[in-house]
Amino acid sequence: MPKTVLITGATAGIGLACARLFAGQKYNLILIGRRIERLQILADELIKEFEVEVIIRVIDVRQKNEVAQLNHLPDHWKQIDVLINNAGLSQGLDPIHEGNTDDWDTMIDTNVKGLLYVTRVVSPWMVKNKSGHIVNIGSIAGKETYANGNVYCASKHAVDSLNKAMRIDLLPFGIKVTAIHPGAVKTEFSEVRFKGDKERAEKVYEGFDPLNAGDIADSVWFAVNRPVHVNINEIIIMPTSQANTNYMIKNL
């Protein structure tokens, strides 16, 4: 019987790469995102290319009432083997005394509360089944703090802590929990951070070779594909040219 994966933030970047990889491994998919056109195009492509079942849900994970739609999934779709909490973003790059409080709300509501809302719906199904694997996409920013990263770093530190808490709380039910903490990944991340300023976003990656979304999807698959008795608590994955949040070598 095919397994099922639910992926948030599936319309771009790491979420999209995970969707393609898991479809290639014959998982059925529940894809969540805010952009219906992208979701539909991706679903059609995966169904045609990999002959898997795909359902899409237009959900903003910041909105608890929208996440609650998942409770109305058909029962056989609630047999979720893997939940990938991927939806996340950064807004702005301002020092704390100049921060935009709307940006703060967006980051906290997406990166922390959104992850919690989705997990709160899905984890009871895994508890009932006494199986499942939750993968939380964190960041090196959840391990270290860098200048002007204040609230984004705080939100990803929260993801790191929640990952550890989930691992403890769900241990009695045989549920695996993993965090993937990437360094610099070239996706739409910087474009979103700078609110559509593509030129500024491109400069972030100039002079060095960042990770790509497929690198992170591979790490997710590695963690999920371990034997039953093995849990990968966390993976920190960096570009070769980046040591930490504050130190990288350009033109390596």
Image (spheres, rainbow, N blue to C red):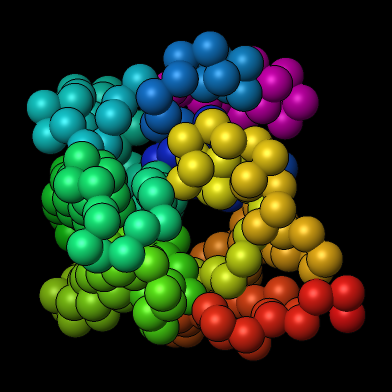
Furthest residue to the front?
A: 98
From the viewer's side, name the closer residue of 208 and 231: 208
Q: Residue at x 34, y 32 (%)?
A: 77
Q: Is residue 98 magenta?
A: no
In percent of the image, x 55 and y 82: which residue is there? Answer: 246
Residues drawn in magenta: 44-56
Q: Is residue 179 above or below residue 132?
A: below
Instruction: Evaluate whether residue 149 shows in this view.
Output: yes
- The x and y percentages for residue 216 are 62, 61
- Tell me which residue sits at (47%, 46%) in the image: 193
User: Looking at this rendering, what residue extends furthest in the right direction?
Assistant: 252
* Residue 162 lies in quadrant: bottom left
Front-most of residues 155 and 94: 94
The residue positioned 82% from the left and 66% from the top of the image is: 207
Give the camera-side residue of 101 and 78: 101
- Does 119 sit left or right of 81 as displayed? left
Query: What percent of the width, then of the height, locates residue 117?
Result: 17, 45
Residue 185: where, in percent of width, then height?
Answer: 64, 59
Quadrant in which the C terminus is drawn:
bottom right
- Seen from the viewer's position, the closer of residues 86 and 202 is 202
- The answer to whether residue 174 of the structure is visible from this angle is no
Tell whether 195 sits left or right of 105: right
Q: Is residue 51 magenta?
A: yes
Q: Name the spot of residue 163 as percent of width and height, x first.
A: 28, 72
